[in-house]
Amino acid sequence: MHYSKKTLKESIIILAAEKVFGEVGFKNAKMEDIAKKAGITKVTLYTYFQSKENLYLAVTFKALQLLIEQYYQTIDRYKDEKGIDSVLALLETFMTFCEQNYLYSEALLVYFAMIRSTSSGSDEAKLTDAVKDSLYYVKLQDMHNLPFKLTVKEIERGKIDGSILCSVDPMLATLFGWTSVVGYVKVISASGKNATPFFNISLKELKDLNLKITRQMFLNKNI
């Protein structure tokens, strides 16, 4: 019973943090404002989350959990379809997820940038004490490769069923798709709810082009 109360309180705090981070950004967010939004004292907040970075990592962990759950749902929907259709659906799932969750997309990009700059966390000198002490950082490390692995598995399925013709290594193809989508995601996370077209090009057109180019790559046996 004590554990369930603790979990509930943490969920309330994380929701409050999402609202504050979404309104003013991570750098401008203050712990006292998060505590006020959660209806608790600042002292109580620090008993659950010892730093703002830890709280942001908790939001990031929640984002990754939701993204992975949507990946599994997409894979299940396309289990009887060709592998190429499942892979493209996963890319679209990621883009749509970011469209609908601006804060989550930004948090995920920040996290993966940190992972790259610290050699997957092995270069601890580049990590703050708050990050190193965060349980959510450990949890994220345990699962952050899963979206890539799920995509690789569907690419391999596409190679087996003949719907994917390119000879590119599945992980390399996955990373290519990831990098092509990251630019789109950065536009989404930067624009937020006030997203507007660039040069009279809608975000849907940009999204469709990403998917079209990726499909063409998979269908090209000379790649």
Image: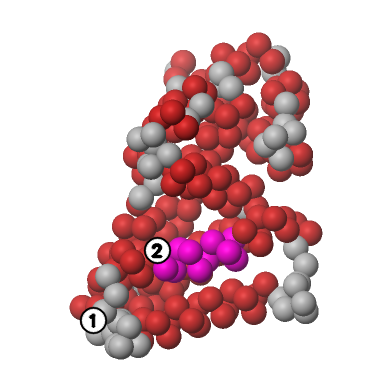
Quarter containing the N terminus: top left
How many marks do you count on the picture?
A: 2
- Kindly report the distance in space between the C-alpha atoms of the residues bearing marks 2 and 1: 22 Å
Indicate the quadrant where residue 199 lies: bottom right
Q: Amino acid at mark 1?
A: Asp
Question: Where is 53 relative to 151, above or below?
Answer: above
Q: Left of 169 or right of it: where is 188? A: right
Q: Name the residue at 31% across, 57% down.
A: 149
Residue 89 sits inside the magenta stretch: no
- For the residues carrying marks 2 and 1, which lies nearer the camera in this image? 2
Rendering coords of residue 189 (x, y %): 65, 55
The secondary structure that most of the magenta stretch takes on is helix
Rendering coords of residue 138 (x, y %): 39, 32
* Mark 2 residue crowding within 10 angstroms, few (<14) / some (14–19) / many (20+): some
Ranked by sequence position, the earlier of labels 2 and 1 is 1
Q: Amino acid at mark 2?
A: Leu
Q: Name the residue at 26% across, 79% down.
A: 167
Q: Which one is in front, 69 or 156?
A: 156
Q: Which one is in front, 22 or 206?
A: 206
Q: What residue did someone put label 1 on?
A: 161
Q: In this orientation, does residue 201 appear?
A: yes
Q: Secondary structure at mark 1?
A: helix
Q: In this orientation, does residue 63 appear?
A: no
